[in-house]
Image: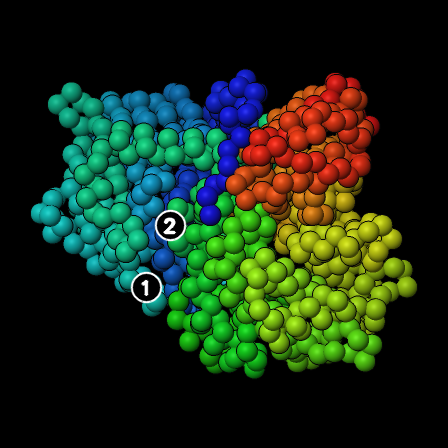
Amino acid sequence: MTSATSADAVTAPTQFSDDAMEQAVRRANLVYTLASFQSGHPPVPPFVSNGIIGGCFDLHGFMSHPNTGYPEGRTVLGYNGHHHARAHGQHVQFPLAYIRAHFSDAHPINLVDCQTYRQELDLLTATLTTSYDLYGPTSLVGYAPLHVPNLFVYRIERTPISKGRVLHLEIEAETSRCQNNDSGSQVDAVQLEFLHGTTGGRPDRVTVISRTNATRTRWIVQCPGATLEVRSHVHVRLDRDAAGVSAHTLMLWVERPDGTGIEILDQDHATLHARHRQLWREFWSTSWASFPEERAQSVWMRTKYYLGCTFPVITARPMCPTGVLSNIWGYYFPQDVYFVAENLPRLGHGDRAALAARDWIAQLPFVRDYTTRLMGVSGAYYPWTPPFQDYERFEIDGVVGADSYELHNPAYVLAIVWHQYLISRDRELLAAYLPIIAGVFEFYRNISSRSAGGTWDIYHPDARGQDEASSTDGKLRNLLCAGFSVEYSARALVQAATDLGLPESALLADARSVVASGMTRQTLLRPDGWFTTFEGDMRPNGSQKHPVQLNPIAFLPMPDMTEPGSPCATAWRNRFELTLDAKRPMTCGWTLGEFALASVRMRSATDLEKDLLAIQPCRSADPRWIQFYESSFQEGWHLSKAYYFPMSGLYLQAFTDCLVQDWRGHLDLFACLLPHWRSQSLTFHGLRSRGDLTVSGSWSAGGIHVVIQPGERAADTLRLMVSQDLKDLTASGQVDGPMPLQGHHLHTLRFKERLPIVLTSAGADAG
């Protein structure tokens, strides 16, 4: 899959210029100065990664706090491939190394003695620059080259005032101690081997071999012009030259088959950084947005940045929910990955989405074996926490916990690949994804049966629900979340078969039957108008952990189930009644994020504002919108669990859908503008929609200019709604010439060859 057709050739040059893009992106840069530390807000360490290697950094540009703490999590260097095997064969990602610094005379690095100070994470170039005058001017530039996924680079330039104030770095590779400050993620000590000067006979290189009970990671520390020693760690003295200047490039390179070879270490910092900056600028020029408020701008831009830091440019398992940091869950969940990965094709990064999908396909043969062994049926039941390797050992002696039986889970893997296809319309890609789509439905078919009423029942004796607050005693019949997953999977398979022209089969016939008859839900309907989570669920309101009733709105879109007055719509209206302590407000996991996304898709700006206002009081995000936390508890322990990307991913989806959404099967523009946005201006560029469409546009107090560019695979017709009351709304560029449109009405327009359709309106306050 490519990144989709660009609309650059047809958009207004000033509105979507490089300067406009750079200004929009850099509005969300993370900046700390000496004054920042007097604000009362604890600093959140900047995150820098390329999806394979990277981490968080302390105020001086190093990693002095490897243990989880408030609110930073770990300041460590992580590597996608360094993990430990726990009991039951579950794998836990944990840090590869961390870097501490001190002066030659053992004087500590500190903030109080800094004469000047500035740290900035530039989102536009994914570069962290830390500058200060601490016994001499100092500048540190850190980045994980996008084109060299197995490399991290530090450029350190300093003019120390004396020999005693030369910087010494200690690179610690035995990281189990910092991992083990979280009782739930205990790992064995890392077994280390150091080879100094044996790689090419260079004294400025140290080879480190880090062995866990599951992996062997060979990596190199290189720093030309510095003095390297091996003790219990790698010690790097950043020596001065004859002019008294200490200027060094520290490189950390990890050997891996799909990475760049060791010869990359011969490239200089300037060359590496120039290419890195160029690629990140291209990443941003693909899509960006400029909102009229800093909350939305910070969340949107920073979360898109985290996409680039989490999904690499090579095939690899995405390190969600906390990236390579292992700040909370060292393993990953298909559901949580989906919440983040869903943004990739929407923002024009289908190439990275396709690379990530290759790993789901590579897992499929092992998943099918696992399904037979664990669930007792054939098909593709992707595990709740898939192992990084050695599937045959995973849960061989029993499941990790009851959550291993969460029946809804594999539908999210299907949704990851299916939604890529809906946007790209790439049939070749769909054919490659078909084994996942068919395998997931096959699993669901094998634990489903026709009811006496003609609908389909679903049951497995070990079933666990997505709610995670219900029983697991074999009584969970017709789980609502599972039924939604079955029906969505059936719909995807039927549509995929139609688009690919597949012959009829027994599996496809059953999928058609599920689509026609639906899953059994009438027995779940409560007197107050919405569904319970399983048959016989008599729990009072506020008992659920997650609002699974909203899945057809937010996660597995089935708009026919969400019309006004439907049980799903009624549940959304009563969403704060559903879940545990939602009115406190408090969220267990990603519940508040789903609330916000559902409100946007239901086109209710007032409900969205309510959902957004629920965030800060319960501390599920830091006050500057740098990161979200996995759960929000007023006691505060969760603050050590930093950078919970699934929650960020849901809010990114929500703010994107405020501007452009397509879950109802047609292009829907400006469907959920917050009230205080309507009299202001906003701009967006490069948002992708179902049917191979690219949408760019602007809003200025009701005056709009929107360009809809069809891609190579787009249909000739466009089904379109503008969900605002606008003056003189007109579509031009279509076959039939300029046409007046009406807000809140569904129109069908026709493209003129591959040329764009342009929408305009007169400026006015929108209703």
Residue 334: quarter of image? bottom right
List x then y, in percent, for residue 339: 59, 51
Badge 2: residue crowd in 10 Å (few <14, some 14–19, many ≥20):
some
User: Tag 2: residue type?
Assistant: Ile
In whole angstroms, how far apart are the C-alphas of marks 1 and 2?
20 Å
Return the residue at label 2.
314
The kind of secondary structure element at disc 1 is loop
Badge 1: residue crowd in 10 Å (few <14, some 14–19, many ≥20):
some
In the foreground, 725 or 269:
725
List x then y, in percent, for residue 158: 27, 26
Residue 85: quarter of image? bottom left
Task: Note whether residue 587 is visible.
Answer: no
List x then y, in percent, for residue 407: 63, 69
In front: mark 1 or mark 2?
Answer: 2
List x then y, in percent, for residue 437: 56, 64
Return the residue at label 1.
215
- Residue drawn at x 25%, y 23% is 159
The kind of secondary structure element at disc 2 is loop
